Amino acid sequence: MTDEYKKKIGLPELHTLNITSSQWTQRKGQDTDTYECEELNEQGEVIARYTVKDSTSIYPPFGRSITWTQSTVLNT
């Protein structure tokens, strides 16, 4: 799952996306998982934080969307 999010965000191949917390909600026909993530560089240092929302419709045709926002940039 984190590889899918890493690709969606566009992180470099050698960086890691680490999920630090998650929350699940269901509202208005949408099942939404919200993840707080940290981007780690090759040295294992946290360089940015993201919020990723993975939402799926609970009704046919069961569409899915993944959105993200960058909440913090620590180092580059």
Image (cartoon, grey):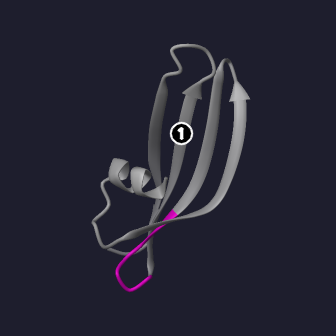
The span picked out in magenta is: 38-44
Q: Seen in the image, is 29 located left or right of residue 60? A: right
State the image coordinates of residue 2 (x, y, percent, origin top left).
47, 57
Q: Quadrant of residue 60?
A: top right
Which residue is more in the foreground, 57 or 52? 57
Which residue is more in the foreground, 69 or 57? 57
State the image coordinates of residue 24 (x, y, percent, origin top left).
70, 41
* Amino acid beneath label 1: Asp
Residue at horizontal 61%, vertical 45%? 34
Q: Is residue 66 magenta?
A: no
- Disc 1, SS: strand
Q: Seen in the image, is 33 located left or right of residue 53? A: right
Q: Seen in the image, is 56 located left or right of residue 8? A: right
State the image coordinates of residue 51 (x, y, percent, origin top left).
53, 51
Task: Give the class, few, some or many, for how many residues have Cα within 10 Å of label 1's Cα (few <14, many ≥20).
Answer: some
Q: Seen in the image, is 70 located left or right of residue 22? A: left
For residue 53, above or below residue 37: above
Q: Residue furthest top?
A: 60
Q: Disc 1 marks which residue?
A: 54
State the image coordinates of residue 75 (x, y, percent, origin top left).
38, 75
Residue at horizontal 44%, vertical 81%? 45
Numbered label tally = 1
For residue 34, above or below residue 38: above
Residue at horizontal 48%, vertical 29%? 64
Q: Residue furthest bottom?
A: 43
Q: Quadrant of the C terminus?
A: bottom left
For residue 44, above or below residue 14: below
